[in-house]
Image (spheres, rainbow, N blue to C red):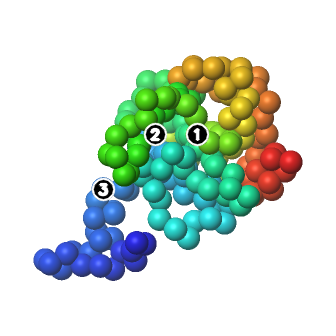
Amino acid sequence: MKRTGEELFSNGHSLTDFWRWAHSDILSNAERGHLAEFIVAMALGIDEDCRKEWDAYDLLFKDNIRIEIKSSAYLQSWEQTSLSKIVFDIKPTRLWDEKSHKYSDSRIRRSDIYIFCLFKCTDVEKANPLDLAQWDFYIVRTSEINKKLSNQKTISLNSLKRLEHKKADFTELKKAVENFQK
């Protein structure tokens, strides 16, 4: 169920108060990942539903295109002495079965495409994850990852660029995903 944020705790605090408290640090790794999923959902026009935590993939686009979203950034929410290396998680995973309450035995990638979301800003003074111009998106077919990287668990930005991919900014992302599947 999608909430409005106006729902109240019994002491009068709102759900928005909780969201501000728990999820305001959108540069942190965990929150940036959720933010990246939302940004892609917005770009694709599929942000009307709630995020599903335990699905086998992150988003489902038209024609049943299953999408896995991964994010990385040069900047982190903690003090840094140097920029972070750009690495994305691509490890095959086990599927959670809601009925049996067990994980599958096999580890595979269950999406049709990956969208790698890079928060590319390197200036801590100008960093704003809400500024969609500060993001780049790389679209790669899961079959390409499986073929070239097999069971590899992570991929660097340079290695990602050597795969067959489509790079897009936020305004181009929907069209890039649609055209990439043809």
Residue drawn at x 58%, y 34% is 109
Residue sticking out furthest to the left: 11
Picture quarter containing residue 38? bottom right
Q: Which residue is mark 1?
A: 110
Q: Which residue is mark 3?
A: 22
Quarter of the rendering occupied by the N terminus = bottom left
Residue drawn at x 57%, y 65% is 47
Mark 1 touches mark 2? (CB < 8 Å): yes
Picture quarter containing residue 136? top right
Q: In the drawing, what numbered circle is on residue 95?
A: 2
- Separation (CA) of disc 1 from disc 2: 9 Å
Circle 2: residue type: Leu
Relative to the observer, which residue lies in front, 63 or 170?
Answer: 63
Label 1 secondary element: loop
Mark 3 touches mark 1? (CB < 8 Å): no
In x, y percent, where is residue 121?
60, 40
Picture quarter containing residue 175? bottom right
* Residue 19 in view of the camera: yes
Relative to the observer, which residue lies in front, 157 or 50?
Answer: 50
In x, y percent, where is residue 133?
67, 52
Q: Residues within 10 Å of mark 3 (few under 14, many from 20)?
A: few
